[in-house]
Image (cartoon, grey):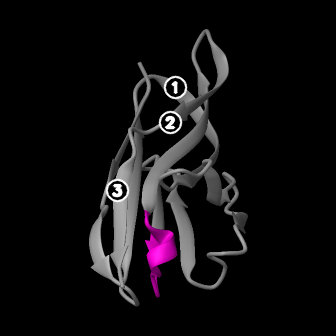
Amino acid sequence: QVQLVESGGGLVQAGGSLRLSCTASGSFFGINSMGWYRQAPGKQRELVATITSGGSANYADSVQGRFTISRDNAKNTVDLQMNRLEPEDTAVYSCYAEINVFFTGRRDYWGQGTQVTVSS
């Protein structure tokens, strides 16, 4: 069974920083892309940032220059460093990974989500 477990959410004042982490565990033989999505109340889920196994990153325009995504392939982790946070960044952030699973093939997995709240 493959799981993604997130940590690092919380409450921060505008202008502050938070770091989210996500670790994949279970029986698999490789991870393709990993990333973070977020969903604010009353809004659709949106991409925040993704990163390939080779380290190529892609960001939403709204977070470009403030957020940095990174991954450690040896540890099966992906992190999101969030700086200069704004109240508009308040949302539930979910980790995502496209994982190659034994006997099943390539599948998408999601974490349980972690709340990020930015106060003004």
Mark 3 / mark 1, whichever is N-terminal: 1
Q: What label does residue 110 carry, if any?
A: 2
Q: Is residue 92 above or below residue 56?
A: above
| Residue 89 part of the magenta-drawn span | yes
Q: Magenta segment range?
A: 81-90
Q: Position of residue 12 (x, y in %)?
A: 29, 78
Q: What label does residue 115 carry, if any?
A: 3
Q: What label does residue 28 carry, if any?
A: 1
Quadrant where the C terminus lies?
bottom left
The image quadrant of residue 26 is top left
Q: Is residue 39 above or below residue 59?
A: above
Residue at 48 percent of width and 66 percent of height = 80
Question: Marks 3/1: CA distance?
Answer: 28 Å
Q: Position of residue 52 (x, y in %)?
A: 69, 54
Q: Are marks 2 and 3 in contact (CB under 8 Å)?
A: no
Amino acid type assigned to the residue bearing label 2 in the image: Trp
SS at badge 2: strand
Amino acid type assigned to the residue bearing label 3 in the image: Gln
Mark 1 / mark 2, whichever is N-terminal: 1
Q: Mark 1 or mark 2, which is nearer to you?
A: 2
Residue at 46 percent of width and 87 percent of height = 84
Dot 1: within a 10 Å radius of its alpha carbon, few (fewer than 14), some, or many (20 or more) residues? some
Question: Marks 1/2: CA distance?
Answer: 15 Å
SS at badge 1: strand
Residue at 36 percent of width and 63 percent of height = 116
Using residue 102 as the reference point, say whether residue 78 is left or right of it. Answer: left
Q: Is residue 60 above or below residue 7?
A: below
Q: Are marks 3 and 1 in contact (CB under 8 Å)?
A: no
